[in-house]
Amino acid sequence: MEGFGPKIILELPGGILITETVVNTWIIMVLLSIFSIIATRRLEKVPRGLQNVIELLVDGINKLTIQTMGEDKKSFAPYIGTLLLFIACANLAGLFGLRPPTADINTTLGLALMTFCLIHGNGMRRKGVLTYLKGFTQPIPVMLPLNIISEIATPISLSFRLFGNITGGLIMMSLFYSALAAFSTKLGINIPVLQAAIPSVFHLYFDLFAGILQSFIFSMLTMVFVSGAMD
Amino acid sequence: MVLRSGLVQIDYTLFFQIINTIILYFLLRRFLFKPVTEFMASRQNAIVASMKEAEAKNAEADQLRLEYQKKLEGAHEEGRKIIKDASKRAEERAGEIIAQAQEEASKIKDRAAIEIERERQKAANQMKEEVAALAVLAAGKIIDKSLDENSHDKLIKEFIDEVGETTWWN
């Protein structure tokens, strides 16, 4: 069946599937690591060229973390930065013809589960396990089930928000490409000429705008939830 | 025909992606965030330190300038004093030298006067003797043997002394 799911690249024994998502993630990881290593290879007192970009990026992420979570939680900055960079790159992968890894519920749910663990792990570490768990019975003990549901809803809403946005864009774009190809055929041209130039506006919206916005939203919500559980 | 997995299908990819994210986190922390953040912090510290140092140096320079100015003023004052002292001393010395020279000169003059007086006395005495001898000789020649040389010599000397003192020198 031809659907919109990620392609299966390799099937390992035991039914373990290596899909397009994982491979594209590896590509993004390699590119980000190479970029980091090259950009930070020779840091100079007076920044030049790429160093300016990297300093702006790292400083911006550090400042955003401190501003959102507070000075005492600035150690989260590398994780927030990783989220931001990885999700942004994953969303933008569509521009380069790679299937965005974030258009796979496994990726987004994985990220959301890590956020979930960070929320509760840090909450317990900061407040003590009992005090933290007691917090679920606030303001009245009857609220306990609702509080638990609300906590479980957090990773689900996080993961499906990102997944839905990117997958929606992906599906819309492929439908749009198919429509353009069909129009080209209708016009009596065998080459889908309409696919040139016209989709770029939609790429601008679905990939660039929505992609960067969603990476920002995911990181911001992670910061807000984690610092909310700790304070 | 390409095999695709389901669009919303949770499988092992979830674990792969969690592990991938964790690995990426460590990679980025090690190669991007840690070095850049540390570098920027150290640069910030260096800038703050150098600014503080510059301020301290400025203050030190100001203080040194004031100190030197004071010292310079002191030196000028001292110089003026030294010059004043020296000229005063020189004047004193000059006065001393002049006084000494005058004293010396007057001493020399006195000595010279005494010498002259003595010489004159000597010359006068010699002259008196010679005149007396000549007078005796002349008188002897004129009167011949009538006068005893010794008694008349005395007589003539008395005469010359009487006359000489008043007439010879004036």
Image (cartoon, rainbow, N blue to C red):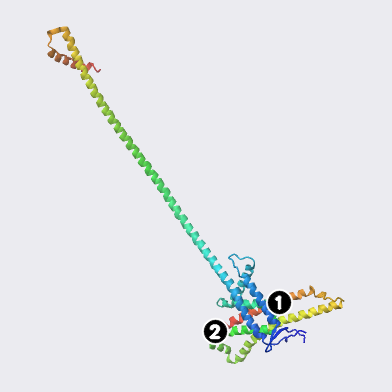
Q: Percent from the top left, x then y, of residue B144?
A: 14, 7
When the figure is inspected, residue B85 is found, relative to residue A148, above or below; the finding is: above
SS at mark 2? helix
| Residue B168 found in image quarter | top left
When the figure is inspected, residue A133 is found, relative to residue B165, above or below; the finding is: below
Q: Given the current orientation, which residue lies at the most extreme bottom position? A: A142
For label 2, the residue is A125
Residue drawn where x is 56% and y is 88% of the image: A133
SS at mark 1? helix
> Is B55 on the left or on the right of B151, as rendered?
right
Q: Are marks 1 and 2 on the same chain?
A: yes
Subunit of mark 1? A
Of badges 1 and 2, nearer the viewer stands: 1
Q: Percent from the top left, x then y, of residue A207?
A: 72, 76
For label 1, the residue is A93
Q: Mark 1, residues whose alpha carbon is within 10 Å: few (<14), some, or many (≥20)?
A: many
Q: Percent from the top left, x then y, of residue B63?
A: 46, 57
Residue B117 visible within the image: yes
Q: Given the current orientation, which residue lies at the most extreme front position? A: A13
Q: Percent from the top left, x then y, of residue A46?
A: 59, 64
Residue drawn where x is 63% and y is 80% of the image: B21
Residue A79 visible within the image: no
Subunit of mark 2? A
Q: Given the current orientation, which residue lies at the most extreme right position? A: A188
> Is A193 on the left or on the right of B15, as rendered?
right
* Count of numbered circles in the view: 2
Three-letter residue code for mark 2: Arg
When the figure is inspected, residue B32 is found, relative to residue B144, above or below; the finding is: below
In this rendered view, identify the residue nearer to me: B159 or B29. Answer: B29
| Residue A34 found in image quarter | bottom right
> Is A20 on the left or on the right of B123, as rendered?
right
Residue drawn where x is 71% and y is 75% of the image: A208
